[in-house]
Image: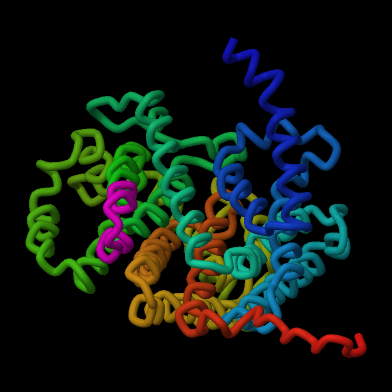
Amino acid sequence: MLAAFKLYVMPYLVYAIVLWACGIGMTKKASIPLFVYIVLVIFPQFWYPIQDFPLGSYSLSMLALTAIIGGHRQRPKGDPSAPNKGLVIVFLMASYIALWNSSMRFGLSMPLTSNNELFPQWRNYAIMVALYFGAFAAMRSETLIRRAMLVVFWVIIVLAWRELAGFASGDTFSYNRRCSGPFWMVGLNANHFAAFIAHFSVVGIGLLALDDNKNRKRLYLAAFVASLYPLFFSYSRGAYVAVLFAVLVVAILRYRAILPLLGIFIIFWDSILPSSVVDRIQMTESPDGQIEESAALRLVVWALAKQIFSDNPMFGIGYQGFYFASVGLPLHNVHNYYLQTAAEQGITGVILLAFFFGRAMWSGWRLYHDGTSVFLRGLGLGFVACLCAMLVTNVFGDRFSQIEVGSYFWILFGLVDRARVLSKTPPDAVNVPKPLRPAGALA
C-alpha cells in the first residue's frame, strides 16, 4: 500500500503543494515557497516524478523565483537592501560572461536558450545564487529565520535516519558500499552527499555554542550526532577533514575546553573510528609510497587545469569549459574548485571567488559579534563554520555549484545578511504607519 501511495498519490500531492506554495508566495507569504524549496531540493525522489507534469520540470525554479519575486513585492517600505547585493550580482554576471566565453570557444550556440547545452546548467546555477535574495527578502524576522534553520536540521536528521535504516557498513572499505543519500537520482555521488552533510551539520555546532533554548540545542546536537553516520560511511576523506577543521575553528572561538579532546582524537583516530573508515583513510597512500588510483587520476586533471590556466591566465576557457578540454581523459572534472575556477575564469575569477568567500566570512563574523540575540550570534558562528568546511571540501572537487549541494549555502547567506540588518535596524524603522488624516481632509 505504501508503494502504491508513493507511485500514484505522492507525485500529485507534491505537485499540488508546489503550485499552492508558488501561489501563496506571490500573493501573501513569500516564506512559504522557500520552506517548501528547503525540503524538496534535497529529496529528488519527491520532485523528480513530477518532471512530466505541466511546468513540473521547473518546480524548483518556480519555488525559488516566487520566493524572490514575492519577497520583493511584500517588502515593507524602508526595508534596507541586502548588504552583499552588489557582490552577488557581480558574481552572477561573471559566471554568465564565462558562459559566453566557453560557448564561443567551443562552437556552441549563443547562450540564450536551451539550444546551448550549457545554458540549462547555468540557469539552474543562477537560480541557486539568486536564492540569496529570496532568503533575504522573504525571511524578514528572527522568528522566520529560526523556523528556516529548524527545517534545515530536521532535513539533516531525516537524511541520516534514511541512511541508518537502509545502509549497513562492512568491516572494510568498498567502493560499492558508500552512503550516497538521495543525490544519486540526479547523478551526484557519495562525495557530494558527504560535502552537503559536512557543510550544514557544523552550523549546528555554532548554534549549540551560543543558543540558550534547550529544545533547539537538543535539535542541533541530534542533527550533528546523527550526521556522523552518513558522514563516516560516505568514505569521503575531504569531508572528514572539512568537519574536523570546522569544529576546530568553533572550538578555538568558543569551546577552547574541548581542544584537548580534539588533540586526543587526532592522535588516536585510528583506534576510535570504525575499521572501514580507517581502511579508507589509510589507503590514500600504500606503504611503498604509491598513491591510489583515484588520487592519481586527480593529479592528472589538476595538471591539465594548471596548463589551461597558464595558457589562458586572464579569463580562462569559460564556464564548464574544462569538460570539453578534457576529452580523452577518464575524468572530465577538475576535482578542485579553485583550480577549476582558475582554468575556466582565469585570475579574474579566482580573485572574485576569493573576495566573495572573504565577504561571506565577514558577514558571519560580524553577526557572531553584533547579533542582538544569542540565536543570531550562534547563526553567525555556524555560518563561519559552514564556510570553513566549504573551503576544505572544494579542494577535492566542485562542492559549490550543484543546486542540490549548494542551495542551502545561498539561503543561509541570505538569512545571515537579513539577521545583520535586523541587528542594526530598530523595530520601528520599517513599515511605519502613516498618520491619520484629520476629519474632512481631502484625499
Q: In x, y percent, where is residue 271?
A: 10, 41
Q: Quadrant of residue 349?
A: bottom right
Q: Give whichever of 312, 442 is nearer the camera.
A: 442
Q: Is residue 418 left or right of residue 272?
A: right
Q: Is residue 102 above or below residue 205?
A: below
Q: Quadrant of residue 370?
A: bottom left
Q: Residue at x 42, y 57 (%)?
A: 396
Can you say which quadrant of the picture contains the N terminus?
A: top right
Can you say which quadrant of the picture contains the C terminus?
A: bottom right
- Seen from this angle, which residue lies furthest top? 1
Q: Quadrant of residue 176?
A: top left
Q: Residue at x 47, y 36 (%)?
A: 181
User: Is the stretch drawn in magenta largely helix, strand or loop?
Assistant: helix
Q: Residue at x 34, y 52 (%)?
A: 216
Q: In x, y percent, where is residue 44?
A: 61, 37
Q: Is residue 337 above or below residue 84?
A: above
- Seen from this angle, which residue lies furthest front? 439
Does residue 399 appear in this view?
A: yes
For residue 212: magenta? yes
Q: In x, y percent, where is residue 169?
A: 30, 27
Q: Provide the residue span drawn in magenta.
A: 206-219
Q: Give whichever of 377, 347 is nearer the camera.
A: 377
- Seen from this angle, which residue lies furthest right? 442
Q: In x, y percent, where is residue 263?
A: 10, 60
Q: Residue at x 39, y 44 (%)?
A: 293
